[in-house]
Amino acid sequence: MTSLLRPTLGPLPRSVLIRPIVGNGSPEILDHAATIARRVIELPDPFENAGAMLLRHAVWRVYERVGDGCATTAVLSAALLREVLRVAEAGWSISQLERVLEQVWHCVRANLLEHAKTDISFDQLHAVIQRAVYDPVLARLLSEAVDAVGPEGVVLLEEGVSADPTCVYEEGIVWDSGVLSPIWLQAPDGCCRVHEPRILLLDGAVTKGVELLPFLERCLASNIRRLVIIAGEIRHDALALLVRNGERGVFEQIVALQAPSVGWQQQEILEDLAALTGGFVVHCNGGESLSASSIAVLGRARHVWATLRHFGILGGHLDRERVRARLRAARAALARADDAYLRTKAQERIARLTGVTARLQVGGAVPREREARRLVAESAVKTAQAALSGGLVPGGGATLLGIARELRALPMRADPCEVAIRNAFGTALTEPIRVILTNAGIEPGRVLAEADRCPTAAFDVLRQSWVDPWLEGLLDPVQVIDTAIETAVSIVRMVLSTGALIHRTWPAVAAHP
């Protein structure tokens, strides 16, 4: 697995050709490490396959977290495992090796964070994206989008029909859910708009008109003539009652919208909407009665628009304390999320609570090209947001080389196991820059020999010279490097603690005549 991902490391990557599983079509040409890892389904040798699947899973988790660093993770894992196994041959116990490895890793992480620069300029952010995308137009659009939405905002990436990428910034807050009846979409553009509405939020289904009628009468008594209802479900008599009230002019405007998502996620979104509009959710599923609710539960907004598939709220009368509390809850959910879907949903909630969203369309001549460009753009967005969150360090393997140099310079201690692991870690940290140089056709020995004379510089393989990384934009996000090292250590510890592998074979089933 590592040999497949090594060629993709660095600014001059080599490609990997993967033939289709079915048929004799043209091979897929890839230089994206995460995608290559996902294309590996099974190796012929069952025991080699176990290690490959372990690395495949780890690499994909790195991609989901920070978008980059997948090839670095594979290279570091293989190098660190090789060096630690050499140390293990000296006879130290596995538990001792794991304990010392953990200590040295924490030392490496502290050293990494000391080198980080958190005050990032737009040019530095653009440099990080430019090196990930290679397309100057797309890189500029992505840089502007990430800079606008911030580290926790959402850049929605879609496949476009045009070869040129486009980016649209959506004002206010938009959800992927629309009106419950197309009868409200009478405008030529198929969009319903309500100005200065009051907003009713319902958790649950409403099917009978008598459940809505008392509340609607209280709205009319309070001179509320423009009402937007966002509910889990409104159907049958209840929906017909709303339509008739609108058609007869009882209300100037009355619209029912489908609440986004389902289940507990829908409940979270409704609570977010309540905080953003200054209203409260009526929990019909929780036993609360809509007919007994007062108009104090209604929220406010400057403008609400809706189509069959989307709705947006502009100028909500938000409750800032509640919004801050909902943001804390959403960030906690993001920290707990253990898969890409949950992380995406948490990030979308955060973006909507902060009110900034960018929608970017990436096109191409054929579907395969559009999908490849979208994946590269998605990776670049994650990497750039990781940079905004955790800061930047010199790239091109320079930071890892500097940490390895500082590990060797640490004072010697009485524990020979610690010294051995420290040396093993230092040797492994030099492996990424060796691979970057090799992929660029440069002899690593010469460059590494010059490294001690250029401790604050980084070697740029494009220019084939030592440069100031902060001036030239040769930078890596701290979170990418930290995640790669953490994952490599985790893989090594798992291998060290594995005592046996069991391969299951299934008996062949004889076919009946």
Image (cartoon, grey):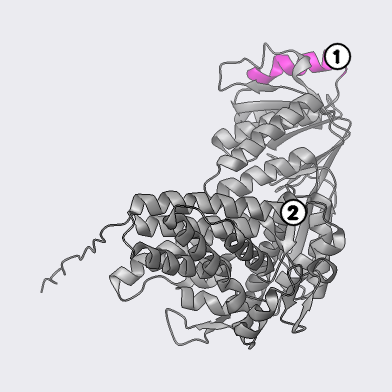
Q: Give above or below for 486 relative to 82.
A: above
Quadrant for the C terminus in the image: bottom left
Name which residue lies at 45% across and 64% down: 55
Q: Give above or below for 403 relative to 237.
A: below
Identify the magenta region.
210-223
Residue 359 in percent (x, y) is at: 77, 57
Classify mark 2: residues with Cα within 10 Å, few (<14), some (14-19) or many (20+): many
Name which residue lies at 62% across and 15% down: 289
Q: Nearer the viewer, residue 36 or 478?
A: 478
Q: Nearer the viewer, residue 492 or 180?
A: 492
Q: Which residue is mark 2?
A: 391
Q: Would residue 344 be counted in the magenta stretch?
A: no
Residue with the most extreme left position: 513
Q: Which residue is mark 1?
A: 222
Residue 244: in sight, yes or no? no
Q: Quadrant of residue 321?
A: top right
Residue 239 in percent (x, y) is at: 67, 31
Residue 479: in sight, yes or no? yes
Question: Label 1 is placed on what type of residue?
Answer: Ser
Q: Give above or below for 98 relative to 166.
A: above
Q: Tell us which disc is closer to us: 2 or 1.
A: 2
